[in-house]
Image: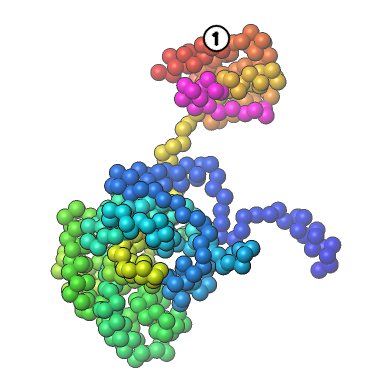
Amino acid sequence: MSAKNVNEKQKKQPIQTPKGTHDILSDEYFLYKTVLDKGEEIASYYGFKPIQTPHLEKEELFTTTLGETTDVVEKEMFKVKGKEGDNLVLRPEGTAPIMRAYLEHGMHTLPQPVMLQYQGSFFRHERPQRGRFREFTQFGLEILGEKRAIAEATIIQVMTLTLSELGIKQITVRLNSIGDKECQGNYKKELLKHYKKDTNQLCKDCQRRIKTNPLRLLDCKEEKCAEIKSGAPQMVNYFCSSCKQHFKEVLESLETNNIPYTLDSNLVRGFDYYSKTVFEFFEEEEELENIDTKNEVIKKEGTMATNTPLALGGGGRYDYLSKMLGRRDIPAIGAGLGVNRIVQIMKERKLEPRHKKNPKVFLIQLGSFAKYKSLNIMEMLRKAHISLQQSISKDSIKGQLILADKLNIPYVLIIGQKEALENSIIIRNMETRAQETVPIERVVDELKSIMQ
Ligand code: AMP
């Protein structure tokens, strides 16, 4: 293609959002705000303090903590070269930055635990598909400096309440323990022994996982790996006594607080920093075989759920993360909700955003003098908390009345040249079509009395 043709093609193609990213227009914006505010409100009652960390972090923060062989580190980070030659990335997840901030600001010297909440954008260079974007929003919670199981129960409770108060009632918490370094070592050996019997039958990813990240073998959704996976040894049988005790306490603390859960012995989470408890939130109750919601299930075998729906959130314990960052072990646990997926469900269910105020009044301005005066009128209404819609650019009364009618707005204020000169305004009831003229300074009182 000649340079001229390339230029012409470029001219015709309007610039759009980058692949996997989206503009959030105002209707959807209110749904995002509803989710984030609901999470923030509930978390604040439970003692989580807000924190905001940068969208840019040093690349090594993630390469040293998530695991060299994870998809995120291997292929999904958006890398940014700083002018000083520093290697930065757009943050792909929230937990490592929170631990960095906790250590950087000496929060380990404060009374423990430190309970933090955050919200914002995260970035992963994934193949865009249903529920998977390159920029996505998470609401996250972290409890740092607490090893007891009540930390797990607190996080799971706040996340579950957030989802259910948003109108997503059927929530399943899938729960598992992946043990600690001690029990994982023995378990991985047995798991590899089992998988190595039949390496050629495995999907490509599992062939790679055998070498790089054996626990992720359990996470495979491929049909061809299902059989070998179903016969795999179970982590529960390899727990050391402290992991066994901790998991029992997690289950007890959930049961004491009536938080329903489902054990899923194939649940493992992607990053290297996880240990012991891991969990994910799903919308529907899944029929897992061989599951039970009693403590004793820890001794039973679980199997993989087929047709796994998209997770609305996930989290886990990460007692080794601070050591990966060069400090002593600090027990900690956290979780993140995927806000885009929650908003999608709310849209499908037609669940109403909390903040969207349907305007009660439409302001029609006719002529430039009236338009100048309209700013004062809008300010009077704002101070009186009367929500208003207007159209600065429309000049015909008919067009503006049609718009007010379309938007189902019950009252219209009309200010034309005459009214502007007389300092008055017309109030029109859209249903009865009755209208009256009142002095501008009386408009708020009049509206309040008729709207009661
Ligand atoms: P993760 O820690 O990766 O499991 O992420 C926690 C939650 O964030 C997931 O359960 C999803 O709901 C959401 N999430 C993760 N990655 C994406 C993505 N690429 N696009 C949209 N949501 C995502």
User: Is residue 278 or residue 345 the one in the foreground?
Assistant: 278
Magenta stretch, residue numbers: 378-394
Q: Which quadrant holds the C terminus?
A: top left
Q: Which of the image's four quarters has the N terminus?
A: bottom right
Q: Residue 214 lies in what quarter of the image? A: bottom left
Local crowd size for mark 1, using a 10 Å CA cut-off: few (<14), some (14–19), many (≥20) = some
> Residue visible at 82% across and 63% down?
5
When asked about the image quadrant of residue 207, the answer is: bottom left
Q: Nearer the viewer, residue 292 or 157?
A: 157
Above or below, 169 relative to 320: above
- x and y, in percent, of residue 164 in the image: 32, 48
Q: Position of residue 291 (x, y in %)?
A: 22, 68
Q: Residue at x 59, y 20 (%)?
A: 376
What amino acid type should be assigned to the residue bearing mark 1?
Val
- Disc 1 residue: CB within 8 Å of ligand 1: no
Q: Position of residue 16 (x, y in %)?
A: 65, 54
Answer with left or right where residue 96 lies relative to residue 1: left
Outermost residue toward the left? 296
In the picture of the structure, the residue carrying the numbered disc 1 is: 438
